[in-house]
Image (tube, grey):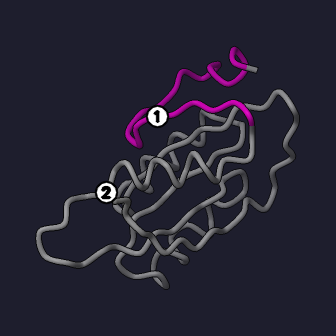
Amino acid sequence: HGAQAMVHTLLATDVVLNVHDVSWVTQLTPDRLNLFAQMLQRWPGPASATVYVHDLEEALKAVYPLRGRVDFHLVLADLHPGRLYPVNTLRNVAINKCRTHWMALVDADFIPNEDLYAQLV
């Protein structure tokens, strides 16, 4: 049976989507947000990112400055002992909440070439 997740979505504040757009799709934890911010410097397109959080209020503060082109989906951590990091669930949330038809599904630590977005669209 599938995992259940409480998702709080914050839509990007400055994104204008078009039919040919490609979204950067990933999942991460708050400690990876600095790397994600570096990636955004090289990816001028939209993004859909699921963040696995323990403290919703702190996570909201952390992602707020990055919301220009990013739809953030905050998933509250399952604190049951022995639970593994739910990579499949988090990835699926980011995919299902993506607002473009095309996506680049990538690991949170990946930094693209400067012209990758232009090559894809």
Q: Are marks 2 and 1 in contact (CB under 8 Å)?
A: no
Q: Which residue is mark 2?
A: 86
The residue range painted magenta reads 101-120
Neighbourhood count class around disc 2 (C-alpha, 10 Å): few under 14, some 14–19, many 20 upward:
some
**Is 113 part of what is drawn in magenta?**
yes
The image position of residue 18, as x and y in percent, is 88, 36
Taking the spot 42% from the left edge, 33% from the top edge, the residue there is 110
Is 27 placed left or right of 10 in the picture? Answer: left
Labels 2, 1: front one: 2
N-term mark: 2 or 1: 2
- In this view, which residue lies farthest toward the bottom? 57
Based on the displayed image, in which of its 4 quarters is residue 102 positioned? top right
Taking the spot 46% from the left edge, 81% from the top edge, the residue there is 56
Taking the spot 81% from the left edge, 56% from the top edge, the residue there is 14
The image position of residue 57, as x and y in percent, is 49, 85
Tell me the number on the disc at residue 106.
1
At numbered mark 1, what does the secondary structure look like: helix, strand or loop?
loop
